[in-house]
Image (cartoon, rainbow, N blue to C red):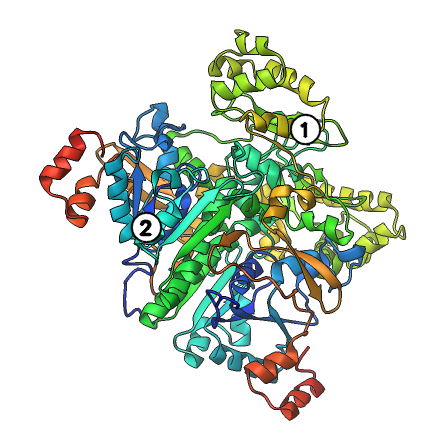
Amino acid sequence: MATRLPLAGVKVLDFMWVLAGPGITRAMADYGAIVVRIESVERIDPTRTVGPFKNNNTGAEHSTLFGNNNAGKLGLSLDLKKPAARAIVLDLVRWADVVCEAFSPKAMRAWGFDYESLRAVKPDIIMLSTCLMGQTGPLARFAGFGNLAAALCGFYNLVGWPDRTPSGPFSAYTDYIAPRFGLAALMAALIHHKRTGQGQYIDQAQAESALQFLTLPIIDTVGSGRKYSPIGNDDPEHAPHGIYPAAGDDRWVAIACRIDEQWQALCAAMDRPQLAEDPRFKTFSARRRHREELDRAIGEWTRARAPLETERILQARGVPAHTVANTFDGNADPQLLHREHFVRVNHPVAGETVVENSRYRFSRTPAEVKRAAPAIGGDNQYVLEKLLGYSDDRISDLVANGVLG
Amino acid sequence: MAAGAQPNVTSRVAMLSGCRVLDLTTERGLMCGQILGDLGADVIKVEPPGGSSVRSLAPFFAGQPGPERSVYWWAYNRNKRGITLDLETVEGRDLMRQLAARADFVIESDHPGALAQRGLGYDDLRALNPALVYVSITPFGQDGPKASYADSDLIVMAASGVLILYGDEDRPPIRMSVPQAYLHASADAAGAALIAYYDRLNTGLGQQLDVAAQESLGLAQQSTMLAATIGGDETRRMAGGVKMGPIRVPLVWEAKDGLVTCVFLFGSALGVFTRKLMNYIYEQGFCDQATRDKDWIAYADMLLTGREPIEEYERAKGVVAAFLRSMTKAEAFDLARQHGFLIAPLATIDDVLQNPQFVAREYWQTIEDRDLGLKLTYPGPFARFSATPIEYRRRPPRVGEHNREILVGDLGLSEREFGDLARRGII
C-alpha cells in the first residue's frame, strides 16, 4: 500500500523558471504536492536550452538539467498575452494553496498577477516571489542568473589561488543555495496557514538567502576587520589539507587531517613512518608552516595510484580522504547507488531518462519520484479537464484560439 | 519590509511558535536549528558541560580565543537558547529523554549510531514521543558503504561532484575558501524537517530524516553528473568560466579597475542577452556590423558543427573583452542595470556590506552583547514574510545560559536537584 505523502493535497501554481525557483517546487513534488507549472511556448525555460542533453540532442525536451529540476510536475502552456489565458490562471489561483513565481519584479504585475490582485481572488493564498535581488530597492529590477548574484554576494572572490585572479564557483552558485531557503519559507507559511488560516506574501531575494552562507566572514569582517580573499585549498584547521594528484587524466584525491592521529595514520599508510617524526611535520603548527614540502611528499605517493585506491587505503585507517569525483564518477559511486540516488523515469518525448532522487531520506514517507518533467504543454488536457473541470468544448475552443501556447 | 506587502496582519505569532527544537548538532548542523529559530521555533542548543567544541573554532573576535568569542559559534546560533548536559552520564541522558518526550524536533549531526549507543537514537526517542521529527545530518548518510567515512568540508566537496568543477585547468581543483558543504546540508535539513512537520500536523506521526551532505551539496554540480547515464559529455572545469565541448565560455572578465562577471552565451534563451549586448558594443564602435549580426541564438550549434570556426568565436570574445576593459566595474554595472546586460562586479565582503540594495532594504541586522562589548552584523532574514516577519530575537547563548530556565522552569526539577546536577558536572 502506498504511504500518503506529506504534501498530498497541497496544490501549487508554479510560475518559476530557470534554476532556483523550480528547485523549490521539485522538492514539493517529491513529497506529494500537485505542482502545475505554467510555461510559454514562445519563451521557454532557459534551462531547456542547457545540457546535459539526452544523447546530445539539444531539443527543448532533451535537457536533463530541466528534467532534473522539474520532475514530478504537470506542464500547462499558456500564451499570457491573451485574456483567456489569464482567466485560466485566475481559476488556477482559486484552485491553488500556493502560487510561486521567479520573474523579475515587474512581470507578474503586468499580467495582473501581483499579490494584491491574487489575494482579491483567493484571500488566504500563499505567494512566493523569488528573484535575484528582491522585490524592492534600487537593484530590484536587476535580473539575471545566479552567477551575477554570486558575484555581487562575494562568492566569486572566495574561490581562487592567492597568486591568480579568482576563478569563482562553478556556474550559478546562488541558484543552489536559494531553493533550500525558499522551500523552508514556503513550508513555514503552509504550516502557519494550517494553524491559523492565514495566507501571506513572501519576498525572497536570492542574494539575501545566499548570504546566509557567508554569515561567518560577514560577522568577522565587520567585527574584526579581517579581509577575506581566496586561499586555494588551504585551511587553518587542517594540515595536511589539499587536493593531490592521482594516476589518470585530470584525476585527483582530497586529503584532510585535523588531528595528529590522522596524520600519523597517513604516514603509516604511505609506509613512511619517519615523516611523522620529522620535526618539519611532527606538530600541527609545524605542518602548517611547512605545508609546501608536506604537500609535495604526499603528492609523490598519491600520484602513483588511482584516486579510489588512495581513498580506500586511507579511509580504512580513518584518514579523511576521497576521490575528487569527476562528472562521470557519481554514476558508479557505491554510496549514491546505495541511496538510490539515480531514478529512471519515462519522458513523453525524450523516452527513458534519469533524474536525481530527493536529497534526503524520510523513514516513514520516502519521496516518490515517478514522473519525468513535463513536456511543454504536455498536461494541458489533464490540468484543464481534471483539475479545473473545463468541458471538452471549452478546451477545444482554447486550443483553437491559440490560448494554450 | 517589501512595499505593498502589508496585508491582513491579524497575528504576529511566529510561524513555528510553540514548536520546540532540541539542537544536538556539532559544527556540521548548526544552521538547521538557526533557520527553524528564525521561523519562530523555540530552539534549545544542547552542549556538553564546558561548551560545544565549536566554541574553540577560529576565527575569534579581535583574534582573542574564548568560549564566547568564536565567530563560528556566533554565526550559526542566533535565535537559540542554550543548555549544557553531559550525555555520557545516565542522568544526563535521562534528562535528554525527558526533554525529547515533549519536543517537536531533534536535530543531530553525530556519526551514524553514536546517539543510539547512548539510548538517544531515533528508535529510542520515538518510543517516548511518536510525533518526534528526528533530523540526522551526516556526510554520507546513516548507512551504506561510506556511512563511516572520515570527513571534512573538503572531503564532502570532493565526493559531491562539485569540487572537480572549481578552479584552474592547469592546477588541482579548489574549494571555496569559506567552508560550505554542511551549510547546504543544514539548509536542506530545515526544509525537510518542515515537510515532515507538515505531515505530522495531518497524521500525528513523526519520522527520521536522513540528510547526507554529499547529496545535498551535489545540487551545486548542476546535473552534470547525469550526463554519464544519458549519453552526454563530461564537464570539465575552466578558470572563471565553463567548458562546453570545444567552446570555452568565460564568466570572469577584466574591467579597467578589477573583475566583473559577464554572461556571453547562446541559444534561444541566453542568446537574446548576447544579441542585446553585441548591439550596444557595435554602437560604441567596438565591432563591425558582421560581428554584431552573427546568429547568437544558433551560435553554439554553429560552433559545434563547424559552420563557424572557433577562431571567429575567440575573436568575438576579444571584442567583448576590449569593451569591458574600456570601463570601470561600476560603469559596467550601471550599463547592465540600464540595458539589462548580464554583467556584475566581483564583490569583496566590504563591497557586499556597502551594496546600496542591501542597505535600502535594511537587510543588515545587528545583535549586540554589551557584557562582551560586541556588536555583530548579521545577514538579515533569508526571506521577507508579509504577515509573520523573521525576527532576530536572541543572541547566541552563553555556555549553559538557560540551564535553570529550562531544567527547573520547564522540566520541573527542584532547586536542590538542579544544584546537585551542577555540582556533579552533569550540566
Q: Residue at x 51, y 68 (%)?
A: A33
Disc 2 marks a residue whose amino acid type is Val
**Amino acid on which the number 1 mark rests in the picture:** Glu
Q: Which residue is mark 2?
A: B21
Name the foreground residue: A209 vs B226: B226
Q: On the rendered image, what quadrant is the C terminus of chain A found in?
A: bottom right
Residue B5 visible in the snapshot: no
- Report whether B237 appears left or right of A287: right
Per the model, the C-alpha gap separating discs 1 and 2 is 42 Å
The residue where tag 1 is placed is: A309
- Out of B322 and B120, give the one closest to the viewer: B120
| B270 in relation to A216, above or below | below
Residue drawn 52% across the image and 55% down it: A179
Q: Quadrant of residue A70?
A: bottom right
| B308 and B31: which is toward the camera | B31
Does the rendering let one see residue A236?
Answer: yes
x and y percentages locating residue B102 in the rendered image: 26, 53
Is residue B354 rendered to the left or right of residue B125? right
> Which of A357 and A297 lies nearest the eye of the viewer?
A357
Picture coordinates of residue B298 (x, y %)?
A: 81, 58
